[in-house]
Amino acid sequence: MADMSRREFVGLGAGAAVVPFMLESARMTAAAPTAQEIVDRIRRNVGVEWNQTTIDTFKAGDPSTGVTGIAISSLATIDVMRRAIQSGANMIITSGPTFYSRADTATPAGRRGAPPPSPDPVLTAKNEFITRNRLVIWRFSDHWYARTANPFAQGIVDALGWTKYRVGNDPRRLSVPSLTIEALASHVKATLGARGGLRVIGDPKARAQTIAVLPGTIPIQTTLTMLPEVDAIIAGEIREWESSEYARDLVHRRRRKALLLVGRSLSEDAGMNACAQWLTTIVSEAPVRWIAAGDPYWRPTA
Amino acid sequence: MTAGDVVDRIKGNIGVPWRDATYRDTYKSGGADTVVTGIATTMFNSFDVIERAVAAGLNMILPHETTFWNDRDDVPVVSADALYREKREYLTAYNVVIFRMHDHIHDRRPDFTYVGSARLLGLDPSRETPAGSHRFTIPETTLGALASDVRRRTGIRTLRVVGDPNARVSRIQLGVGYATPLANVADIDVIISGEQQELDGFLDAPEYVLDAAALGITKGWIMLGHNVSEEDGMLDMATWIQTLVPEVPVRFVKSGEPFWAPD
């Protein structure tokens, strides 16, 4: 490699510091797309037919707002929104609900026939926070899950560093060099950033080679189909009278089986990182950043 | 002594009208005619529990939860599965009769699962106000110290907690199993319960409690796991059933927490 002239060196240094700032300013003043335009662009490019009955809708804010930056996360918590604002974003795309329910209503949901519930202090404060900061929140779950290959599974596999071990390019199926369940659990914990949410069923000393990666909430039917076929499942969450009991019985009788649960929210975290990476390929006018929501759970150590 | 005799005595003494429409509290293996050598109560009717009951000479099992990994113990859900057939064959080979005791355990007063859970956690019944509310006021402490105390008392390996460990708390709402109280229930600092769907429910507690903590609103959420949260009540159920059925031994067989976690 030829020696760099001092002038070229200075130019590179200055460019690294100044050029992105200028580009971002230019982008935002030139043609800031609205939140609705971002969503339209996602719908055109996601490669999945759009379902008319979907939870993938605006949850808060004005869709005609000009977007200064997009923050992508698995959960639009107040902490995530604060970090989004610090990064200059005013549009948040989340795979989880914003207002703590599938209905995602900004006021407490009432049960049918019952008097309207009294205002909830956390809901009220969250609404005020969103309004004060002029945020726009849009949920992206159904159609991101429906994409092939499953981006939530792909996100986990990338985080695990095991992309090369995919079976037939399907991130839901891995064939890895044999390792103990104990080592697998430690690797999952470290690479996904789990704290207290990770729970494991299986003999720590048993070995695993074939692994199914099943983010989200999985029903017993899925576990019945998959666990006999593979050595271990890495999943989001299950019902504890279903899949974890099946896994307990299977481990008891077959030994070389394991079920690792990371929690629903954490199981979608890495898939929203994948979403941010994808979105940068179709949105050039505003910066796009992934904000890790992380593991909501901790556990006492003493 | 037949299984039918045992079930009749339970129905006659449970203290609440029997729900004939229940799909839970029914026979899952064997039937009323099966002759009973001994009775086991348990939380989850795992293969391991069944083997230990059989080894102890107890061929009638009264589990609180499912045998075949779905709430209705629907056979078509599991019939294609090799482990289902193995479990079924084992039950038949050892003449095991299973009668689930779920709905009526929660209907009766007191509900054994709450009694057992409060005892396990060291929650003093005299501090339950009002009586039967499952609300307990404890001397003020921090969420972190309370969680450590719960861990020490229960021995749970995978206790899960959400909330600020430094938050000062004293008012506890106890739930059991999947009957986890809503995180925003009024005048309560901490929910302690078994299990709840994490997202997309009616009021998703983990996210709600994270936000409450971010806003400085006192709120804690401690999940024991479904098994541990109701298991000690099965000891109370065994004691009660022994009084109804003195002719055969009645034992509590522990299924235990199924999970562990890496350090």
Image (cartoon, coloured by chain):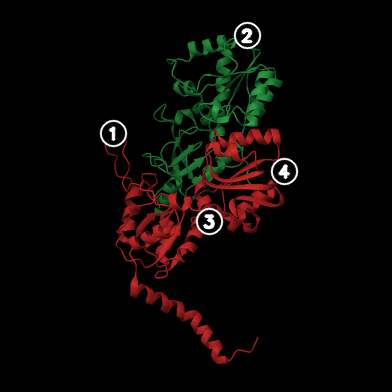
Residue A238, given in percent of the width and then of the height, sits at 53, 40
Rendering colour (chain A): red
* Residue occupying the point 49% across, 84% down: A14
* Chain assignment, label 2: B
Where residue A25 is drawn, which disc sits there? none
* Chain assignment, label 1: A
Q: Is residue A283 above or below residue A250?
A: below
For the residue pair B5 and A43, the one nearer the viewer reads as: A43
- The kind of residue on which mark 2 rests is Glu
Label 3 to label 2, Cα distance in Å? 58 Å
User: Visible in this render: residue A80?
Assistant: yes
Q: Secondary structure at mark 1?
A: loop
* Residue occupying the point 43% across, 47% down: B209
3 or 2: mark nearer the eye: 3
Label 3 to label 4, Cα distance in Å? 27 Å
In the picture, one chain is green; tell me its letter: B
- The kind of residue on which mark 3 rests is Ala
Q: Secondary structure at mark 3?
A: helix
Q: State the residue position of label 4.
A: A206
Q: State the residue position of label 2.
A: B247
Q: Crowding near pointer 4: few (<14 within 10 Å), some, many (20+)? A: some
Label 1 to label 3, Cα distance in Å? 40 Å
1 or 3: mark nearer the eye: 3
Q: State the residue position of label 3.
A: A270
Residue A148, given in percent of the width and then of the height, sits at 51, 53
For the residue pair A67 and B234, the one nearer the viewer reads as: A67
For the residue pair A228 and A290, the one nearer the viewer reads as: A228
Side of A298 relative to B96 (left or right): left
- The kind of residue on which mark 1 rests is Ala
Side of A273 relative to A115 (left or right): right
Q: State the residue position of label 1.
A: A114
Does the CB distance between marks 4 and 1 fall below 8 Å? no
